[in-house]
Amino acid sequence: MIDREHELSITCQAKLLGISRGTVYYLPRPVSPADLALMRKIDELHLEHPFMGARMLRDQLDRQGIRAGRRHIGTLMLRMGIEALAPQPGTSKAAPGHKIYPYLLRKLAITRANQVWALDTTYIPMARGFVYLTAVVDVASRRVLAHKVAITLEAVHAKEVIEQAFARYGVPEIVNTDQGSQFTAEEFTGVVLARGCKLSMDGRGAWRDNVFVERLWRSVKYERVYLKAYDSVSAARADIAAYLAWYNAHRAHSSLERLTPQEKYVATLPALKLAA
């Protein structure tokens, strides 16, 4: 957001954005190799056992000979953008200043393309760092409509990826997300509501709610990411994009009558009304 070559001084730009000038010059401390290795193990365990919180993860890691404290694991989980998918205390409380929308998919028959889209973000490990992958998925067909690999968890990335999906595929009836801050921020929700879509949000810790996207993350990681060691963000972007293109066009699903997501999407698009 800060343009160092703009005619306005950095001080003025920071003031207009409502941020401290000091944050412009702050360079975050890189994550240590030991923490990166630990985050990779946490990611693998979370994918297999999403109900595990910091205490259970600590115990599982201990069984593998990996010593880490519960608080340290909790801090890394926060940095990765993951939490235990089990009932949590205070789940009815909204994030300060962020409106939480009700979950609309319970008992809803999702049978056609562009009926419901789901968004989520997942942690992607690299050889020396990590990135976040955000994707828009058509729930009925499992087709990935748009995605973005970014180095931060911010609403601007969620906004950009949903706008890409709108531009390419039109507007769904419902957009479903979790309660992550990037999805509850007005910067994102305003874009969705302005298109006339209904917003639906998973209950915190309700792992059944976003199961379609969780299955996608499992495929992405086991079939691609865990087999690689990306040495740069650009390499991660290019390889994940190539995988998702293959996933859409060539990966048949037993749950889709052995059709690919692309084939299912086209087959279940609502028929266009003929002009009178």
Image (spheres, rainbow, N blue to C red):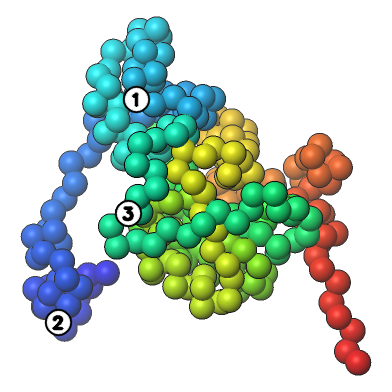
Name the residue nearer the viewer: 213 or 242: 213
* Residue pointed to by mark 2: 8
Separation of marks 2 and 3 at Cα, in angstroms: 34 Å
Disc 2 on helix, strand or loop? loop
Q: Nearer the viewer, mark 3 or mark 1?
A: 3
Q: What is the crowding at mark 2: few (fewer than 14 residues within 10 Å), some, or many (at least 20)?
A: few
Note whether residue 151 is visible: no
* Residue pointed to by mark 1: 54
Q: Amino acid at mark 2?
A: Leu
Residue 137: quadrant of the picture: bottom right
Q: Amino acid at mark 3?
A: Ala
Q: Earlier in the sequence, mark 3 or mark 1?
A: 1
Report if the CB atoms under discs 3 and 1 are less than 8 Å apart: no
> Which residue is at 51% across, 73% downward?
193
Disc 1 on helix, strand or loop? helix
Disc 3 on helix, strand or loop? loop
Q: What is the crowding at mark 1: few (fewer than 14 residues within 10 Å), some, or many (at least 20)?
A: many
Separation of marks 3 and 1 at Cα, in angstroms: 21 Å
- In the image: residue 182, left or right of residue 114: left
- Return the x and y of residue 24 as percentages of the image width and height: 15, 62
Residue 214: quadrant of the picture: top right
> Which residue is at 51% across, 57% downward?
102
Note whether residue 208 is visible: yes
> Which residue is at 25% across, 19% downward?
69
Q: Amino acid at mark 1?
A: Ala
- In the image: residue 25, left or right of residue 223: left
Residue 168: quadrant of the picture: bottom right
* Residue pointed to by mark 3: 95
- Return the x and y of residue 185 as percentages of the image width and height: 37, 63
Report if the CB atoms under discs 1 and 2 are less than 8 Å apart: no
